[in-house]
Image (spheres, grey):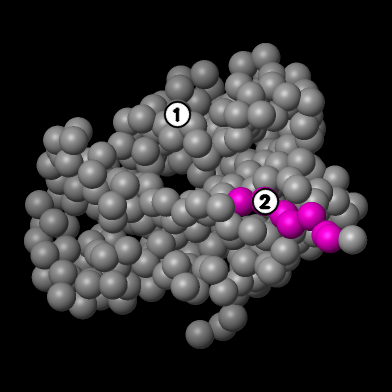
Amino acid sequence: MTRKTIQDVENFWNNNPLFVGEAEYEPGSHQYFLKHTEVYIDDCFAGRFDSSIIPSRLIGKHVLDLGCGPGFWIEQIAKQFPKSIVAADLTENALNLAKKRTEMLGISNVSFVKANAESLGFADNIFDHINCQGVIHHTPDTRKAFNEISRVLVPGGSFSVSVYYKNLFLRSWPFLKVFGKLLSKLGGGLQGRGREVIFELNDVNEIVRFYDGADNPIGKSYSKKEIFSIVPSDLEIESTFLHFFPARSLPFPLPRRLHAWLDSHVGFMIYITGRKCIAKL
């Protein structure tokens, strides 16, 4: 298989911005963003946004939202009143969507930058907080992206990063794939981007990649040990937790309490929060 490049990643996401094809509304419309927020909170957090992902003390701080996509996280970060938010993304289409979202919401302290997470064009030690959710598992060199996060973060600054997690279901897929095919026959799957057949796949790595689209060039999942091994040594991990059980992919509704339990105990996304160490004299 040909090794995928950052250009492959850019091309895919520029042609397939997050959530496009999943809603009946025009991308960039008010209804589109409302629906995106609704689905994101319902599916990624089982109906209740986890505010602990974003520090509550961002007043007067400079924040980087790395891989901003259509702007969901900008909206959440702005509620903590930082001095400035830099929204960075690899693709122009994502930045254009995020701009429209912030304009509709009246968020004025945001600047937009086209950026590659593996090679950020920022000076060292300039951001007080870096938010990077569901992004660096799509880049060829995730370790390099983590190193860049560390480089541009001020000593003592905070970070929140999430990547796909090798949860119980992914680790057990060789034994569950028969059940997956049954779910597919019953109508399970994801809308748009050729993902309707995701439960019919045998290769667990293909399932992870397919989640964002049949043509998605890169999608990786990590065990806790694997992701910890690529966190730079000057980033101190303070907490880890799980979220994201994609109930919308199932052919039947999940009771809210069951969805919440699955979200926090066998979520498909691992969140890592912490701080950059302050060098000792």
Can I make out residue 140 in this image?
A: no
* Magenta region, residue range: 274-280
Residue located at (23% from left, 72% from top):
173
Q: Quadrant of the C terminus?
A: bottom right
Residue ID at (60%, 29%) = 56
Does residue 241 appear left or right of residue 128 in this picture? left
Looking at the rendered structure, the kind of residue marked 1 is: Thr
Q: Which residue, as the protein is rendered here, is positioned at the far front?
A: 281
Q: Which residue is mark 1?
A: 37
The percent coordinates of residue 97 (x first, y second) are 62, 33
Q: Residues within 10 Å of mark 1 (few under 14, many from 20)?
A: some
Q: What label sits on residue 275 in the rendered view?
A: 2
- Residue 169 badge: none
| Viewer-closest of 182 and 222 | 222
Q: Position of residue 34 (x, y in %)?
A: 45, 22
Residue 241, magenta (yes or no)? no
2 vs 1, front mark: 2
Residue 13 at x, y percent in the picture: 58, 53
